[in-house]
Amino acid sequence: MRVTVSSPGSPGSATARSAGTGRLIAAVAVVLLLAGVSLFVGVSDLDPLRVLTGTLTDVERQTLVVSRLPRTISIVLAGASIAIVGLVMQMLVRNKFVEPATAGTSESAAFGLLVVTIISPGMPLVGKMVVAAVFALAGTMLFLRILRSIPLRSVIVVPLVGMMLGAVIAAVTTFIAYRRQMTQTLSSWLTGDFSGVIQNRYELLWLVAIAGILVYVMADRFTVTGMGEEFTTNLGLNYRTAMNVGLGLVAVVTALVIVVVGSLPFLGLVVPNIVSRFVGDNLRRSLPWVALLGAGFVLACDILGRIVRFPYEVPIGVVVGLVGSGVFLYLLLYEPRDRREVRARRPARARARATEVDAR
């Protein structure tokens, strides 16, 4: 049997690259289509023809500029950024079932937001974001410290530890909020909701776009860091520096999204796992797909939440949590075909080795 290997400059590799580019362009078109649909879904009617021709009334123009456009932009930014930091966290922790919502990061950010609201309620939004990011980073570091103390770390044990840590932090946060009569305020932070996003109240989310660019620039360093401290050091990279930068980006983006729109559970877990099954584990190659699928996933969930009980709206955190948990269970129970074939061949190999030993 003859095997043909395509070199980087061969026609086969060029065809594969063009096919990948075509699929990426198609994904961009789908996200743009969902964003366009998002602009025209709501209680207030907007005529697409008037928008295209620029003949909007004053009320329609105000609805579009003040409400619909900021909401759609914030959905795209929040969905893409949470998916990206979920991928980065999975790479650094070396576990496919870890993300800010399963590592105590989101709960720590909400705890920091509660503390700064109690101590200094008049602090600007940027200051609250900084405090929430510091608490999120501290919670993530605590999660990693607990992991180092566990002798046996399986794929399932790691996210369970993170969820238990998050439950403890959430319980403390809820108790303090209850004593301060702030439970409703706390629930608004823990449940993602884009209904309150308007002009001049979402612009901080543009910072997550900068964070996404930094992740893309440092993609190779994060990939090497995910292979372990010894391997990273042998290649001449500073393991702790890369780890701290990655976790810092995760904490800042998580805190930003929670401060502006609330928590989006399972998003950073589901999207990177779906992409890795089709694209692989190369961080630089999978980042555009993760960003597009994250934005498209949240756009679709937001549109569903707005039409399922029209004219009322289901919070995006509820819809994302429901759909994301279902996909999460599917990922846990479904095994890819190539892995099933490898697992099916193991008993045959074991029997062959046993027969060989008996023959000797």
Image: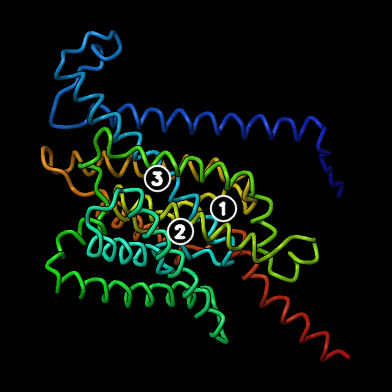
Q: Amino acid at mark 1?
A: Ser
Residue assigned mark 3: 79
The local secondary structure at tag 1 comes to: helix
Residue 92 in view, yes or no: yes
The local secondary structure at tag 3 comes to: helix
Please tell me in which quadrant of the rendered image residue 234 appears: bottom right
Residue assigned mark 1: 276
**Real-space CA distance between mark 1 and mark 3, rounded to the nearest whole angstrom:** 17 Å
Lower sequence index among marks 3 and 2: 3
Residue assigned mark 2: 251
Q: Amino acid at mark 2?
A: Ala
Q: What is the crowding at mark 1: few (fewer than 14 residues within 10 Å), some, or many (at least 20)?
A: some
Mark in front: 1 vs 3: 3
Q: Which residue is found at the position 40% from the left and 54% from the top?
A: 267
Query: Are discs 1 and 3 less than 8 Å apart at CB?
Result: no
Q: What x and y, as percent, mark residue 66?
A: 23, 28
User: Looking at this view, is 274 or 132 the one in front?
Assistant: 132
Q: What is the crowding at mark 3: few (fewer than 14 residues within 10 Å), some, or many (at least 20)?
A: many
Relative to 199, residue 78 above or below:
below
Residue 329 in view, yes or no: no
Q: What x and y, as percent, mark residue 81?
A: 45, 47
